[in-house]
Amino acid sequence: MSPWFWDYALHALNVRVAQMTQTQDVDPASGALSELQRIIKHIRSRWDKVKILVRGDSAYSRENIMSWCESQTGVDYVFGLAQNSRLLQLSQSIQYRASQEYSQKIQTVVEFFETLLAPSPDLEKQATAFVDNSVWYSSLDYKTKDSWSRSRRVVSKVEYGEAEIKTRFVVTSLPTKLVPPGRLYSQKYCPRGEMENRLKEQKLDLNSDRTSTHTFAGNQLRLWFSSVAYILMNALRE
């Protein structure tokens, strides 16, 4: 396992302990920038030219975090972005294209069924079992009304199916010419979830969420024990 993984894992646990001491009205990204600066400085001390991609959910699409990453050489980001009416309006064109493509796929299957079966109003519903959802991506130029200092690239993903239409957004510093919309969402953003599965292994399988002592140091010690156990378990598995 790469050294940076363990550094990240331990860093994430330390942040989690710190968050336990906060009240519920604190922003989820509170303190994230200083921790990000600390860990990137540590990485740079060993690999000064390595390119770094910071991934996170929508809680971290904050102006201070994004502008700091943009000011750094070799540091890019891709964060989830909560949808709003303006973003949904900007993505209407690909919503329409996705719906048209899905309808066409359904119609193709229905026409095939009609060559084999008696006409029935249920054929269209039955055809949905043989058709994948239509997924479309696009890049948008977007700026919030107040909280962002500049326009940024937002990638929208529209998934159109029988039951519903799902629209997701991410904001990134990576340019379109370097990473197209579909590849950015599927290959740069989505792996964040798989990375978090490793942290869930530690939390759920090794009970690292047992932080019920009354002191910060006591809870941190428990997390260290779980970290050591996780490293030993992974070494044995390899």
Image (cartoon, grey):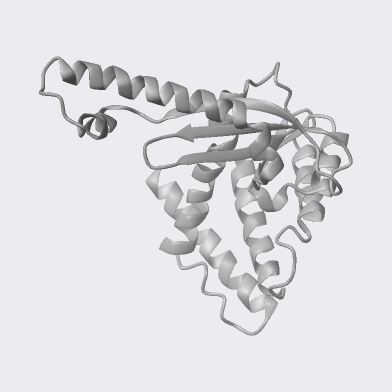
How far across and down, in percent of the image, does residue 36 sit?
76, 49
What residue is rendered at 77% in x and 45% in y?
42
Whether residue 232 is situated above or below residue 5 in the rendered picture: below
How far across and down, in percent of the image, does residue 166 sit?
50, 40
| Total labels drawn | 0
What residue is rendered at 71% in x and 76% in y?
23
Q: Is residue 131 left or right of residue 90?
A: left
Q: Is residue 3 left or right of residue 238?
A: right
Q: Is residue 230 left or right of residue 84?
A: left
Q: Quadrant of residue 180?
A: top right
Please state, as top left, top right, bottom left or bottom right, where the C terminus lies in the image. Answer: top left
Can I make out residue 162 in this image? yes
- 188 and 153: which one is in front? 153
- 18 and 108: which one is in front? 108
Whether residue 11 is situated above or below residue 42 in the rendered picture: below
Can I make out residue 170 in this image? no
Q: Quadrant of residue 157?
A: top right
How far across and down, in percent of the image, does residue 58 sit?
66, 49
Q: Is residue 162 left or right of residue 156?
A: left
How far across and down, in percent of the image, does residue 218 sit?
63, 78
Whether residue 139 is situated above or below residue 232 in the rendered picture: above
What residue is rendered at 26% in x and 20% in y?
109
